[in-house]
């Protein structure tokens, strides 16, 4: 069975008009792919007719979201999904053409006489020949987001439409890990497993960079002796970092990345992108990742043996959240409990109005 988030199998087959359909052309639109056993049979006719009747609803979905975690109070939007509905069966293109004409079908019909596509989607019964009535929702990247095997026709189209609405709504929403992340300081001293730290660093390492130079470098400190030495190079205002079981030094240098003729050195930008992904992954895992600018760079570099030509861009305090924040100053306790503050979108966003 195909798994959620798995890339859907690629295929090239003829439709009922004798045109070759390349599944790679589905990228960019949501797609419902369903397999049915045989044209003109009662169940298959009903399924194809019901999907055809709802085609317009699949193509445009009203999505409403209440997002109290951002500067926006929520929105309602009509999402033009451009959804394509494709029915696949072992029938010939000629049979499918007659099937479309007789029943006025609006969905796309693809012939799979060798059952190769059905096999790739695991939509065959145990005998390897009979079609297992199955349906799949593919997202704009062509990934499987939801699947049904052994479908019963009654009520199924409504179920698929509800599934598509749920998927599109989730895709259109602000990522909740981004929305929930904030610079929290109430960090538990509880020990972090290195496997969790490695997973977070791996997420950062998937970040984009100029010519894929991957300029970021990380040193993870999780041993008490070295942590205590580094604590001596933190300013008084960052006292809370001393509770964190892990400090991550993030560094790079100009030569690690693109240097442009107009003076732009990309290593800072690209490393910043990596740190942002690190924070999102940490939030998803229920951890605080708080990067700071306040530290004695030279003191850290000497202790961690970071070469002189490297720039210590930030230090990240990493750890589990702590519900009881009594160790924080009254000022920081207040900051922890306040709602997140963001400027109005109009203050940071403008649309270019081109005039000749």
Image: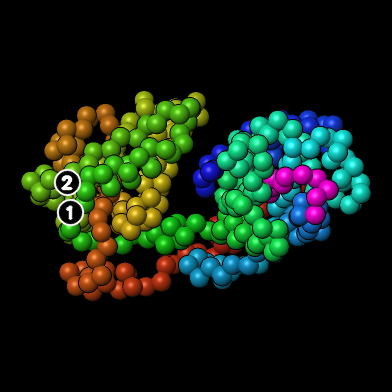
> Image quadrant of residue 59?
bottom right
Decide whether residue 117 is among the magenta residues. no
Mark 1 crowd level (few <14, some 14–19, many ≥20, 10 Å Cα):
few
Residue 191, placed above or below residue 155: above
In 3D space, how far apart are the residues under numbered discs 2 and 1 (Cα atoms)? Answer: 8 Å
> Would residue 60 be seen by someone viewing this image from the given angle?
no
227 or 353: nearer the viewer: 227
Label ID, residue 191: 1
Dot 2 and dot 1 residues touching (CB under 8 Å): yes
In what element is the residue under mark 1? loop
Question: Quick check: is 32 in the magenta stretch?
Answer: yes
Q: Is residue 57 left or right of residue 328?
A: right
Q: For the point 22% across and 48% down, which residue is it?
A: 193
Q: Residues within 10 Å of mark 2 (few under 14, many from 20)?
A: some
Q: On residue 223, which mark appears?
A: none
Position of 75 compared to 291: left or right?
right
Asked whether 12 or 257 is in front, the reply is 12
Residue segment shown in magenta? 30-42
Helix, strand or loop for disc 2:
loop
The residue under the point 33% across, 73% down is 337
Q: Where does label 2 land, which residue?
A: 222
């Amino acid at each position: 069975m195909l798994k959620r988030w798995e890339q859907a199998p690629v295929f090239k087959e003829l439709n009922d008009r004798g045109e070759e359909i390349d599944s790679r052309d589905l990228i960019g639109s949501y797609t419902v792919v369903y397999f049915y056993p045989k044209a003109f049979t009662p169940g298959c006719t009903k399924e194809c007719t019901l999907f055809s009747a709802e085609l317009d609803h699949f193509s445009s979905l009203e999505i409403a979201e209440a997002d109290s975690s951002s500067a926006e109070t929520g929105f309602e939007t009509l999402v033009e999904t451009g959804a394509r509905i494709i029915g696949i069966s072992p029938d010939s293109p000629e049979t499918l053409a007659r099937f479309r004409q007789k029943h006025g079908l609006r969905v796309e019909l693809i012939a799979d006489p060798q059952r190769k596509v059905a096999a790739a989607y695991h939509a065959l019964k145990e005998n390897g020949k009979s079609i297992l009535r199955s349906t799949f929702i593919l997202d704009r990247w062509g990934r499987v987001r939801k699947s049904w095997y052994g479908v019963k026709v009654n009520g199924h189209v409504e179920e698929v439409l509800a599934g598509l609405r749920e998927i599109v709504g989730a895709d259109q929403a602000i990522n909740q890990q981004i929305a929930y992340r904030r610079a929290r300081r109430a960090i538990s001293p509880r020990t972090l497993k290195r496997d969790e730290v490695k997973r977070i660093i791996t997420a950062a390492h998937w970040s984009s960079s100029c010519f894929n130079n991957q300029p970021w470098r990380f040193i993870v400190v999780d041993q008490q002796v070295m942590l205590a030495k580094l604590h001596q190079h933190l300013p008084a205002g960052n006292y809370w970092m001393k509770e964190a079981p892990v400090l991550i030094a993030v560094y790079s240098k100009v030569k690690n990345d693109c240097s442009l003729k107009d003076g732009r050195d990309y290593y800072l930008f690209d490393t910043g992108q990596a740190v942002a992904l690190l924070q999102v992954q940490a939030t998803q895992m229920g951890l605080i990742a708080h990067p700071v600018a306040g530290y004695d760079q030279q003191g850290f570099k000497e202790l961690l043996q970071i070469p002189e030509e490297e720039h210590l861009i930030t230090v990240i305090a990493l750890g589990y959240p702590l519900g009881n924040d009594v160790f924080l100053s009254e000022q920081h306790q207040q900051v922890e409990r306040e709602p997140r503050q963001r400027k109005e979108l109009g203050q940071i966003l403008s649309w270019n109005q081109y005039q000749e």
